[in-house]
Image (tube, helix red, strand yellow):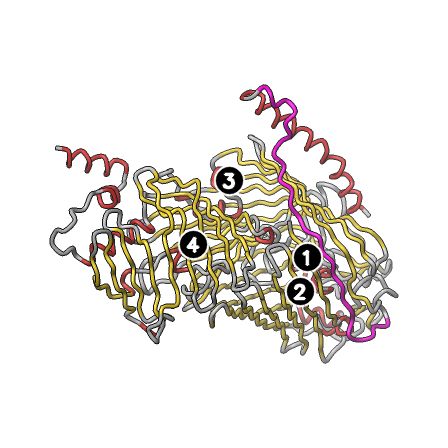
Amino acid sequence: MRAIWILTLALALGISVYAWAGAEPAPGDEKPDIQEIVSKANIVAYYQGNDGKAKVKMVITDKSGNKREREFIILRKDVKDGGDQNYFVYFHMPADVRGMTYMVNKHAQLDKDDDRWLYMPALDLVKRIAAGDKRTSFVGSDFLYEDVSGRSLDEDTHELIQTTEQIYVVKNVPKKPDAVEFSYFNVAIDRKTFVPMKMEFFDKQGRLYRTIESKKVEKIQEFYTVVKSEVKDLKKESKTEMEFSEVQYNINLSDDLFTERYLRRPPREAIR
Amino acid sequence: MSGVAKATGLLLILPFVVLCARAEASGSKDANDSSSWFKLPPIEVHGFYEMRAGYRTRKDKYAKDMSIMEARAQLDLSSYMSWGDIRVKGDVYGDMVEEQGEFDLREANIFLRPFDFMDLKIGRQILTWGTGDLIFINDLFPKDWQSFFIGRDNEYLKAPSDAIKISLFGDWANLDIAYTPQFDPDRYIDGTRISYWNSVMGSLAGDNAIVHTDRPDRWFRDDEIAARLYKNIDAYEIALYGYRGFWKSPGGQNAAMNQALFPDLNVYGASLRGPLGKGIGNIEVGYYDSSDDAGGKNALINNSEMRYLLGYTQEIGRDLTMGLQYYVEQMMDFHAYKRSLIAGPARDQYRHLTMLRLTKLLMNQNLRLSLFTYYSPSDKDVYMRPNVNYKINDNLAWEIGANVFFGDYPNTFFGQFQNNTNIYTGWRYTF
């Protein structure tokens, strides 16, 4: 009876994630299915709720300790869980990009590029951005475009290499090694929440050169959320800290939001 | 002159608008909190300070060696009321080339969203549409070619319009209408800062022959209306355009008065933009109906033209983007033009223009190298815009760049500017 109630509620709210993210795994059970682990972790990392909003602050620290800051509002709406998504990024800082808006229609299909637009208010210009290498820096930080928007699970083969009381460690090997700068990466996934807690990237020589760590996780509404993370580039000796605040899920963002109208002039409540 | 009058008028209106805004804001606050009677409305203040200096690399008989030398401050104020948004943005700058202080009101507008299906923007504003990259067919909003060529920031290529923009959004399509009650011409090359080919004199000219114009300036009669009907189908953006107004830069001569004219112009066009291969492709066309020159018999008025643009942009390496454009202007009554031409070298019937844009980001995207190259195989002229911009920190940026012109003939679009080749550098502190 209780299961039916939860299912009904989940359907009513459209939170298909709830059952996954919130359900308590039974530790020490039979070996879990690797595909299930990675897809749950993918949902937790990128598809919580139907939509969401957060204020993001990034601090980029280079080798010599110089700091640069980024601050933006990010809005997201899922077209399909684990599939296509729409993103809207409104920049507050630094001052020279203030008011710029970036819109992405992310396509999960491997052979279909994301559609990206940038609005530059000083010129009133809607610029179409050519799809690029997803492993280039996002807004000049140590986070890559792909870290922010998600890497398709179909790009890698996944292998469970370690299971402890707290975590699963999954090794991911790219199917097209020439397309990326790493040879593989390991992800430590919390067994209870399925939050990816640490990612370690190894270069072609097998040396660790890049880590992404979840420094702080909070349960917001029903959803476990990484509110503080840090990426370190061990080669460049630089790091970027990213903090999420004012996180909200299931705020009923309209599909219309992801159109030229709101790219040129975002709704007020969406940008502050 | 009337441009200055308009700016002054707007300045007089502004304090009133701000006062109303404050009354409104404090009113809404009062309802919740009686202790904040004198609380100011939330005005956001941003802007920048900038210093810019540049020199000509060649001697120009008709212009100063200094191509740009100015200190500029931009103040950008915005406030948000329950009923709409207010924005005022203006530049104050000391111009050592013209030896005067200037005020350039860039924006002073109110934005409203009165209905689910409608947006309104009223007042001085920057307007842009169309698919070209620094090539414009259906964007007939004013451009500031002078700023563009002397090395001001790209944002100054767009000059403001005093207009009302109505945007309507529907399931079937969206419609933008921009109405400008008094014609806003380009800030065209008039000889004060940039020397040019003077077709009447049949020679290069500059401060010895400042272009005098007879600008249509009657309110609500010499007006402009521009419309765009657009829709996205999947990832493809389709648009139809219409314009009724005037040639934005002088497009005719009144020989008797020795005045340049802005003849009537109607434009009808279309564009399509979307993914193509690994990049973005765009196509745009426009028919320029020069209605004062029906049949092309008047050599002193621009011919009607067809304009075509093909463009393609792709990321060709890490943080390296390449844009290619091919643009054609076709004179529609060329034979009539040639027969009626009184003196001077004739234009070609077709002007072909290719453009290559390369942009590379380095050092965590803090260093940007960019190069635009326009090359016209028919005019045999070239215009290059190399630029290096380095963000020293989140507020301070330094740049160096150049505007390089060369050509085989003194009367072609870019060739006429060959004595204006300049190098500039600038510092900008943004807050």
- Helix, strand or loop at label 3? It is loop
Q: Which residues are magenta?
A: B34-61
In the rendered image, which residue does mark 3 sit on?
A272
Three-letter code, disc 3: Arg
Residue A19 lies in quadrant: top left
Asked whether B51 falls inside the magenta stretch, the response is: yes
Q: CA distance from mark 1 to mark 2?
A: 9 Å
Three-letter code, disc 1: Arg
Three-letter code, disc 4: Val
Residue A229: mark in rendering: none
User: Which residue is pictured at 66% across the width and 48% down the height?
Assistant: B47
Name the side, left or right, on which A44 lies relative to B280. left
Q: CA distance from mark 2 to mark 4?
A: 30 Å
Task: Measuring from the top left, give residue A258's x and y in whole percent.
Answer: 43, 47
Residue A104: mark in rendering: 4
Q: Are marks 1 and 4 on the same chain?
A: no
Q: CA distance from mark 3 to mark 1?
A: 27 Å
Q: Are marks 1 and 2 on the same chain?
A: yes
Residue B428: mark in rendering: 1
Examine the rendered structure and indicate whether residue B415 appears above or below residue A107: below
Q: CA distance from mark 3 to mark 4?
A: 20 Å
Is any atom of residue B3 visible in this view?
yes
Please report contact status of discs 1 and 2: CB closer than 8 Å, yes or no: yes
User: Which residue is pictured at 68% across the width and 32% down the height?
Assistant: B17
Earlier-in-chain disc, 1 versus 2: 2
Earlier-in-chain disc, 3 versus 4: 4
Asked whether B223 falls inside the magenta stretch, the response is: no
Task: Measuring from the top left, give residue A20's x and y in whole percent.
Answer: 22, 45
Examine the rendered structure and indicate whether residue B245 appears above or below residue B12: below
